Amino acid sequence: MTSSGGADVGCILVTGTAGFIGSHLAESLARNGWSVRGIDAFTDTYALEPKRDNVAAVFRSSALDLVVGDLARDDLRPLLDGVDAVLHLAGEPGVPASWGPAFGTYVERNIVATQRLLEAATAAGVARFVYASSSSVYGPENRPLVESALPRPLSPYGASKLAAEVLVGAYAQERGLSTVSLRYFSVFGPRQRPDMAAHRFIEALLDSRPIRVFGDGHQARDFTYVGDVVAATVAALTAPVPSGSVLNVANGEPVEVGDLIELLAEELGVAPRIESRPERTGDTPRTEGCADAARTVLRWEPRTDVRTGLRRQIEWHLRRRREAAAAPPDAVPDAASYPSAGAPLDPRVAPDAVGVGSDELLQGQA
């Protein structure tokens, strides 16, 4: 598939395919006719079960190749064989856990893995390399953040994402690799990771448990719906953008944590109970992204307001609970049943979609 003046793309490698955003991205691409190869390490960052569920959802609605592999350690040449573009979403997430001795994991999975993938992509001659960066590269600001703002990450996690972003730019400038870095802002929606705010809040409300709030609840986040993030990422595959471009992917309407809880409680028809905790080190008080550059260059627009996105996420939580109660044990294959990064790749075809699919996620994105 091609875009006038952009990259000519056939087979796409999606890293982090079993993750929150990666699974939606792989599903959307495959269902819209792209040839997709996925890789995931199935790390122990959080429970394996949600990742298995994400992969199962993709297989139910689309066909793709999936391998289990470690980008920081495996031979990546077989993985890149026949690949025309890379969407690099794999990495170690989370601000709180990045402090202390765990930082070595962030260096390996966010920096070393990215450098090795960049090297392999350059050698393979891929047409486009899209890197999923983060708003965590920015420092605290009381105004909308633009891409030219001085990066001032407040956490080791943010520093690792910024280091990888700098590597992407270096390969664009010095090695001729066509790259785009997308700074995602507070992504939410179905399949969100268990450690993320909306997921934690919804589960607590459904279980009638107190909601743990770190800080005073006035921290504001630019919550951006996963379907909009997927649409921007797909657009970056072929858009005629200057190599080395960095673009914000943001909704542009920050919501305070306290207001987010009230929205969720209202949608669920319950009264929240708040358990206040001290502010966490590295948490910025406010994020607000200016996505004007992405609007212009990618011809992209965020379409999903926070309330609508939260309703879809709540529906997913409720559906997940119903399915968990009804599903037989071991209904989803273990990660070990997928081929390794060095093994031959066999396409895996699955029946029609059940649950939230890319058509619903990208509603209004045409």
Image: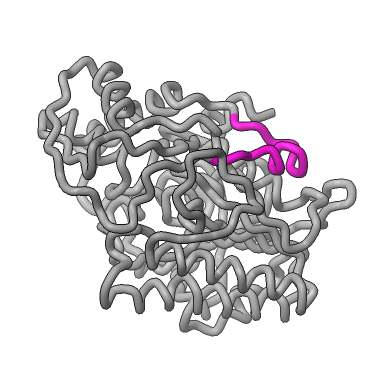
Q: Position of residue 243 (x, y in %)?
A: 77, 62
Magenta extent: 289-302
Q: Is residue 292 magenta?
A: yes
Q: Position of residue 66 (x, y in %)?
A: 51, 62
Q: Position of residue 28 (x, y in %)?
A: 58, 42
Q: Is residue 335 magenta?
A: no
Nearer-the-camera pick, 56 or 359: 359
The residue at the far front in this view is 142
- Quadrant in the picture for residue 166: bottom right
Quadrant placement of the C terminus: top right
Question: Looking at the image, is 354 positioned above or below residue 284?
Answer: above
* Type of colouring: one colour
Residue 166 appears left or right of 126: left
Question: Looking at the image, is 336 positioned above or below residue 274?
Answer: below
Residue that appears at 35% across and 58% down: 94
Q: Please tell me how many numbered marks the rendered image carries.
A: 0
The residue at the far right in this view is 5
